[in-house]
Structures are given as C-alpha cells and as structure tokens.
Amino acid sequence: MRRMETEVNTRAVVERVRTEIRTRHYSRRTEDAYLGWIVRYLEFHRREPEELSVDDIRAFLSALAIKGGVSAATQNQARAAITFLYRDVLHAPVGTVDGVATAKVPRRLPEVLTIDEVRRVLSALSGAQQLVASLLYGAGLRLLEALQLRVKDVDLDRGEILVRGGKGGKDRITVLPRLLVDPIRDQLRAVYKLHRRDLARGEGRAALPAAYLRKNPSAALDWPWQLLFPSARPYRDPETGHEHRHHLHESAIQRAVHDAALTVGITRRVTCHTFRHSFATHLLEAGYDIRTVQELLGHADVRTTMIYTHVLNRGGLGVRSPMDSIGPPAPRASR
C-alpha cells in the first residue's frame, strides 16, 4: 500500500515540476533530464519530498558517485534538478539544498584538430552529414544548434547564421563560411522540393512553440519555418494527428564523424564538438580577438573562451620557448 501511494505521489510531483519547467520555457532536454533525476531521487527514498532533509539529498548524490560511478558533471546535473524541485516547485527554503556541496568537475583541455585533420575528416563525409559537420567547424556551432536551424536562420547574402535559443536560451549571430554558400543553397533546393511534396499531401507543418503557434497557426506551413536538415521520415503527432518532420538525429552525425576520423587514421577521440573546439582555436591562432571569438561561440563569460588559449599550436601552454630563440647549443670540442 505504501509503494502504491509513493508512485501516485511521484506522478503528482512530476506534473508539478513539468508545469513549472514549461512555464519558464526551459528546453525539452532540460525537462527530460530534470524529470528523470527527480523521479530517481523520489524512488531512491520512497518518501514525500517534503519529508526529506539535506542529509537525504546528500545520501542520494553520494550514492550516484560511489555506487553509480557517475561523473562530477552528471552528479551536478542531478543536484540542479533537485534544487529546482525544492526551490522553484515546493518553495522550500533555499538552504535546504544549498547545504549540499557541488561536485568538483575536473578541468580538461579540449581536443583540437589541425587544419589538415579537419580537411581530411570532412572529406571522408558526404551529403548532409558533411554539410552539418562543416557548419560545426566553419561556424562554431554546437551539434543541436546546427540541426535545429530553420530556413529563415541562414542569410546567404550577408554570410550570417542566426542561432536561436542557444545554450542559456540566448540568440547570437555567427559567420557563414563563403565556401558553404553553394552547398547550403543546394540543400535549400532539396528541402524546398520535399516541403512542396509534403504540402501536396496535406502536411508539411513545422514543429513550432505552442504559444507562437496559437498566435500564428498558419506559420507552421510557411517555408521560412522549415528545418534546414529535416529527417527523411515524418512522424505523426498523436495529439493533432498531423505529420511533422524532426531534424536529422544527432546520433547519425555523431557516428558518421567518429567513423570518418578512424577512416583517415586519426586515433584520438574525435566528436562533433571537436569541430567547435577547433573553430575557436584556429581563429585565435589566426590573430582574432578573444572577445570576437567569445561572441561567435556564445559564451557568457570570456573565461570560458580563454581555455582555447591553452591549446594554441605554439607549444604546451601557447608560449614560445626561449630555447627556440638561441638555437641549438654549439657542439663541445672533444679532447
């Protein structure tokens, strides 16, 4: 009986959390992550959250690290979800959660490719996968930022890309490489044909925020709102019965980049985010101001951008050794 009551109450808490998250317009990924951690937290203790203390929170987070073996970043995400539950949903005193220390995340330098390595990896890709990876490097985009681009976000004439709702919900403008103008124009033509076929079937609706869709119901059918990288297969919304196209799945691009790096003989770990790291590092190597790079990447704090000054291709810490100025020592005469 006690277990059934806990399950019912867990569902009630989840609905309250979901409502609060959507009121604040958090991303769907944040919603899924927070709900997942809160459910695990409640199932761990099987008690009402109001009955739990800071020691219970600490016990859950410790179990994640010790028994679960999760990383510090994962542990901190769980802590953030529980903080949200108490502070923003249950309106408990902030001190209830602030007594739990944040796990220390180890500081690691980002992996960076050389320009030649970037060229080789991109050459091993093809089609939309190559174009997406090229945008990750050429514009410094995160993977989801590239996949969620809409037609209206790309300005071929001005050579700009508008990133909407990036990390932290911020918009920013970044550079569109001139080398990618023609490939993107070809991509737009292909997507336009696909959109016209969908319209002919009575579909072709883009997924839009609910509030905007209520205000402009016809916008979902408009060409500017269509995704630049739509999936090959549509899905049917169970609520409306209409078909929509999601963007290409992240795993398809991630797997293609991983395989391409191995194909060209790069044994270091190469991910989609490696292209973004390489974009920033190569700009700094080219002499661009760190504030400019900060704006292009969308970093809130320049200290985040400064990590790339430690991976510049000028020695271990971006410093030219004085040994290189004096040259090799003269050979000592033998006796």
Image (spheres, helix red, strand yellow):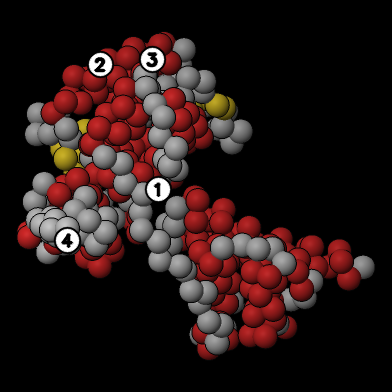
User: Closer to the camera: disc 3 or disc 2?
Assistant: 2
Disc 4 and disc 3: Cα gap in Å? 83 Å
User: Closer to the camera: disc 4 or disc 3?
Assistant: 4
Mark 4, secondary structure of its residue:
loop
Label 3 crowding class (10 Å Cα cut-off): few <14, some 14-19, many 20+? Answer: some
Mark 2, secondary structure of its residue:
helix
Q: Which residue is mark 4?
A: 335
Instruction: Report the front residue among 119 and 319.
Output: 319
Choose the circle earlier in sequence order: 1 or 4: 1
Q: Which residue is mark 2?
A: 186
Disc 4 and disc 2: Cα gap in Å? 73 Å
Q: Position of residue 85 (x, y in %)?
A: 57, 72
Evaluate if marks 3 and 2 touch, with contact meaning CB atoms under 8 Å apart.
no
Disc 2 and disc 1: Cα gap in Å? 32 Å
Mark 3, secondary structure of its residue:
helix
Instruction: Report the front residue among 24 and 107.
Output: 107
Residue at x-position 31% and y-position 27%: 120
Residue at x-position 59% and y-position 36%: 239
Choose the circle earlier in sequence order: 3 or 2: 2
Q: Is residue 246 visible?
A: no
Which amino acid is tagged 1? Ala
Disc 3 and disc 1: Cα gap in Å? 26 Å
Which amino acid is tagged 3? Leu
Q: Which residue is mark 1?
A: 211
User: Closer to the camera: disc 4 or disc 2?
Assistant: 4
Q: Which residue is mark 3?
A: 194
Q: Quadrant of residue 229?
A: top left
Left or right for 21, reference 334: right
